[in-house]
Image (cartoon, grey):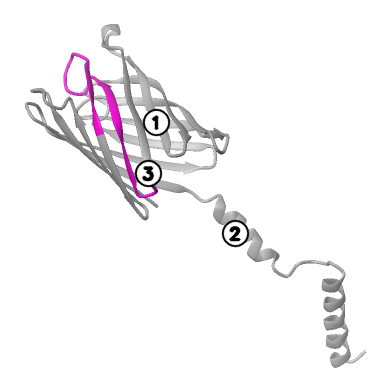
Amino acid sequence: MNLQGAILAATLASMVSASLGGTDTNLPLEVAEETAETEWEYSLSISTYLAQNGRDYANPNLVADRRWLHLEARYNYEAIKTGSFWLGYNFSVGKKLALEATPMIGGVFGDITGIAPGYTISISYEPFELFTQGEYFFDAAIHAGNFFYNWSELSCAPASWFRVGVVVDRTKALGSKFDIRRGPLVGFKYKKVDLTTYWLSPGSRDATFVFATTVNF
């Protein structure tokens, strides 16, 4: 068989294979799309705390997720001048009533040092969402330094770009005593950017504004 005949035969064979449901020539594209779905997802957030009669500070957080794997780094979260690194497992159930949860374990270092099991839980039933994040810190230096921290939000989103709600914060970041603060929240979303303002303990001498910005990429 000459070269032209071989090329013609190969072309006919390819056409017959495709017509009979043979190998899909779009397979490489599908594989690429599936691979893209398993890529890392990141978010960077910075919460700025402006206290009426206290210390102002910023709390940056960096999160990286890939399917079930959750990695997170925080600063000024458990305490001022303190950082933490976290490893967690992502899972979710439900559609209309959806639950997303991430149990985690973290190492804390800085002004305080220790380990902390923690969690992030989100329960949503549109347009309502309950979000809660907490941890129990075990102080490596002294047992009396152990404490439980929690930040919880209940919000309603009448539009995809807007939400309102309430927040409850139980923290030890500002000193040696626990401080439980409550207040309203207002949030806006534009593309991959979330902007939320919180007013903790409104009307009191300990009133604090929190301006949070989150970028997802």
Badge 2: residue crowd in 10 Å (few <14, some 14–19, many ≥20): few
Q: To which residue does mark 2 refer? A: 33
Question: Measured along the vertical axis of the image, is residue 78 above or below residue 189?
Answer: above
* SS at circle 2: helix
Q: Position of residue 80 (x, y in %)?
A: 19, 27
Q: Amino acid at mark 2?
A: Glu
Gap in angstroms between the C-alphas marked 3 and 2: 33 Å
Circle 1 — which element? strand
Q: Residue at x 8, y 30 (%)?
A: 52
- At horizontal 26% and vertical 7% (from top left) the residue drawn is 144
Amino acid type at circle 3 is Pro
* Residue mark closest to the camera, 3 vs 1: 3
Residue 62 percent across, percent down from the top left:
34, 41
State the mark number for residue 158. 3
Please count the marks in the image: 3
Give the farthest residue toward the front. 158
